[in-house]
Amino acid sequence: MMRSNTTAKIGIAMLCLLFSGISYAQQLQKRTISINVNSVKGNKSTVFNECIGAGRANEGLRADWQQQLAMLQKDVNFKYIRFHGLLHDDMRVYTEDKKTGEPIYNWQYIDRLYDFLLSIKIRPFVEFGFMPADLASGTKTIFWWKGNVTKPKSYDRWNALITNLVQHWKERYGEEEVSKWYFEVWNEPDLKGFFDGTQEDYFELYANTVKSVKSVSAAYRVGGPATSATKWVADFLTYCDKNKVPVDFVSTHDYGTTSVLDEFGTKKQQLKSVRDTIAKDVKTVRNLINQSAFKAAELHFTEWNTSPSSRDPIHDTYQNAAYILHVLKKASSDANSMSYWTFTDIFEEAGPGQTPFHGGFGLINLQDIKKPSYYAYQFLNQLGGTELKNMDESSYACKSKDGLQFLVWDYTHPHKNYSYNQDYFNTAQPAVAKNLVQLRASAVANGSYALEVYKVGYQQNDPYTLYLEMGKPTQITKAQEAKLKQAAAGKATVKQTVKVVNGKFNYDVQLNENEIVFMTLKKIR
């Protein structure tokens, strides 16, 4: 019912405009994107697919997790993946003999996981954590799966664990391969929920871990502080400079809401009103690095998203996809990677998701249904490797051997009846028309081209809206699952042959609020 009513309202609005003698397109704000095929900006940024997040290591042993990641790799081709819990007891990495108290190392689960990752051409962005129970100084834990967040009871034993594990990787995968990995120390130690210690305690943990990794190879890259909301970075760099502790990269996290930790998804989340908050934070951290003794250090935002809650409905929406493109375009010049948290809803910090769409972080839901955000990443990857100069801040124009590609979007902050994400995004949000995008390309080779247009927006590759129309069923039938997958199939809305004459390609397309349009122009003769 909602679908037909919305269509009717739009149709009535168009008829009213036509009877008044004014076309519907004339009422839209014109947005002209002018590019010259010979005017090159440079190589397309790869910040978007350098790294992707996942929940915890043990989830990576699941068949469905591995199948989803393999699918994503074909469409986006991420270079690294980062997750928690590598040293957690469910990976059985470290135990102590009950009689002698001697350490017992077991790398078998890690080997199975890392072998799979490398087989699909994605490398580990290693996060050292959390603490094995037998090595822990306390019993404090976080999450449904109870990751231990205390310091080691013995730095001699912690250092031996790290050294032996890294040495094992060197022997199994080779010096050349492991030298391409990143080694990050802990996760969000500034938050008591994640690290039951002080800043000084974390710095001690970092210094010991760096020493252990580099005792295997000085070439291996180690960094931190992996903090929430870009905290501790200046103090971290000062400490490392003063104490001659290496820093190969700086890592930190950022989310688009005022909250930084929502362990069980119970908090009300609200987007920050500043549109470019994450991009500004990225630039601030880059400037801190540039002003430090570690100017050559890379910058990796090893977590970011609209919200830090794994029960926030914004993650399922088409608006989330537009937000992703907005952030990545703005932040790309200052970061080496922006690791979206996470690729899948197979994610159990608050326990398994209880409904097909439950606000999980993932680009893919539990039933392998691609969310709108999935296509934001797929479209970025399908852009050609050469970016063209373009004054429009919410678009890309690229070229490849096959032809031209254009990615255009609108990001509009919720502006009507918006309070909290959990309230606003729990109901369908029809989009209003925003722009008439006028694409004007010059110096295009004359000839015939295959034009394809793809859209992501309200009711376009938008399974969540359809799920809401179904009444938000707690469980879905096979028929409903098939219908949702069909709604997210990523099919072109336009497929036609066009001719380029006098080197000019002109194309107009209506763009609604928080909509994405991806176009490919491939020469056929």
Image (spheres, rainbow, N blue to C red):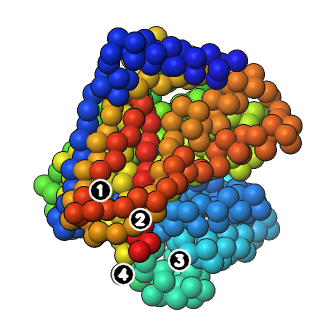
| Residue displayed at 85% across by 40% down | 479
Q: Which residue is mark 1?
A: 505
Nearest to viewer (mark 2 / mark 4): 2
In space, the residues marked 2 and 1 are separated at their CA atoms by 10 Å
Mark 4, residue position? 219
In this rendering, the label closer to the viewer, 3 or 2: 2
What separation in Å lies between label 1 and label 4 (alpha carbons)? 49 Å
Decide which of tag 1 and tag 4 comes sooner along the chain: 4
Residue 94 rendering spot, x and y as whole percentages: 67, 66
- Going from N to C along the chain, the mark reached first, 3 or 1, is 3
Q: Secondary structure at mark 3?
A: helix
Amino acid type, callout 4 = Ala
Quadrant the C terminus occupies: bottom left
Q: Secondary structure at mark 1?
A: strand
Viewer-closest of 375 and 124: 375
Residue 449 got which mark? 2
Name above or below for residue 222 compared with residue 217.
above
Real-space Cα separation, disc 2 to disc 4, in angstroms: 49 Å
| Amino acid of disc 3 | Val
Whether residue 173 appears in this view of the structure is: yes
How far apart marks 3 and 1 lie (CA) works out to 54 Å
Q: Is residue 141 left or right of residue 17?
A: right
For marks 3 and 2, give the CA distance. 52 Å
**In the shown orientation, is residue 37 left or right of residue 313?**
left
Marks 2 and 1 in Cβ contact (< 8 Å): yes
Q: Residue at x 44, y 42 (%)?
A: 516
